[in-house]
Amino acid sequence: MRRYGKHTDEDDIRTRPNRKGNRPRTNIRPKHEDAADGMVLTVDRGRLTCLVEDRIVIAMKARELGRKAAVVGDTVALVGDLSGKKDTLARIVRIADRSSVLRRTADDDDPYERVVVANADQLAIVTALADPEPRPRLIDRCLVAAYDGGLEPLLVLTKSDLASPDKLLELYGDLDIPFVVTSREELEQGGAADRVRAHLDGKVTAFVGHSGVGKTTLVNALVPEDRRRTTGHVNAVTGRGRHTTTSALALPLADSDGGWVVDTPGVRSFGLAHIDPTRVIHAFPDLEAGTEGCPRACSHDEQDCALDQWVADGHADPARLYSLRRLLSTRERREGD
């Protein structure tokens, strides 16, 4: 009996019997051309809450995606039961390319990066002017992560009734970062929310900040119909708040045309192990052109750096070079320093 020749017959091919009686496995995957598009709103223990048209759908990641994980803000393709009814479950079969990614690591020596939010347009860095005291190093780290991930930064300074914002604003003035200053009274009366909202309309904005700075209180004012529990307490000894937002959540901005607010858990550290320092220069177009004369693998903070001569020749403000080097140095410092 000929097994392998020009005229091989199917009956001549030896196959291993399938004890389970089901069809043999195949590497050919369905294309899911009829999948519906959705947006991931939150992730909780393997279950993803997605917005599909005007319905909230609970879904899980399809096995075929392997280790690729969907995060808040991702645009995904879903199949299965998309009715949104109780006890129904859909499957996420595709994750679209991301326009931006906000990432962080637990510490600077932690190789595992965590994607906080995808496809956000800007990062609102919420900082209290007092109670707890502002932490400029943490702000610097958030700025580096924003520039690296393709997000525009926005400074939101809270509790101005307890301290003046002038000193902190002077520190970041040369970076030309938009900012909003608020007080606790303004938040309670709604005036501060209106001024912050003016920077958020039509954009997806991720809010990040140290615990106890009033981040979730501000989000509650911006999205009153989806109030999240606030911290309400700052430890008198450590000056730190208690975490009350335990998972990132995307919420539609009230009275906005397409605006979204992403509330993230309060952070106590913001590791930058994943950051390539060479990409931070892209946030300084007035300095980037001067790097052409730099030596290979220049850190932009060494004796032969061409940026010193570039600034000396009047092509850029010295304060801008100082700001760049300060941001780059955060890669080597912990935010509590």
Image (cartoon, rainbow, N blue to C red):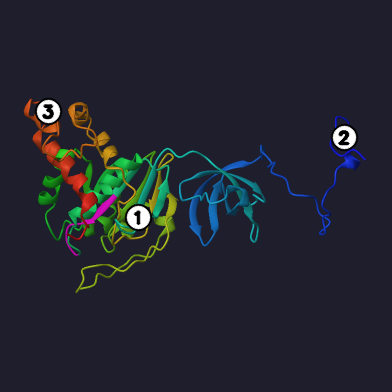
Q: Can see residue 198? A: no
The residue tagged with tag 2: helix, strand or loop?
loop
Q: Quadrant location of the C terminus?
A: bottom left
Quadrant of residue 210 in the image?
Answer: bottom left
Q: Amino acid at mark 3?
A: Trp
> Which-is-in-front pick, marks 2 and 1?
2
From the viewer's perspective, tell me whether residue 270 is left or right of residue 320.
Answer: right
Residue closest to the eye, 135 or 86:
135
Q: Amino acid at mark 1?
A: Thr
**Disc 1 residue crowd, few under 14, some 14–19, many 20+, Cα 10 Å:** many
- Which residue is tagged 3? 310
Farthest residue toward the bottom?
A: 237
From the viewer's perspective, tell me whether residue 71 is left or right of residue 111.
Answer: right
> Which-is-in-front pick, marks 2 and 3?
2
Magenta range: 125-131
Q: Can see residue 144? A: yes
- Which residue is tagged 2? 8
Distance from the alpha carbon under mark 2 to that under mark 3: 74 Å
Measured from the top left, where is residue 292 in percent x and y? 21, 26
Up/down of 243 relative to 326, above or below: below
- Which residue is tagged 1? 105
Q: Is residue 130 found inside the magenta-colored segment of the image?
A: yes
Q: Quadrant location of the N terminus?
A: top right
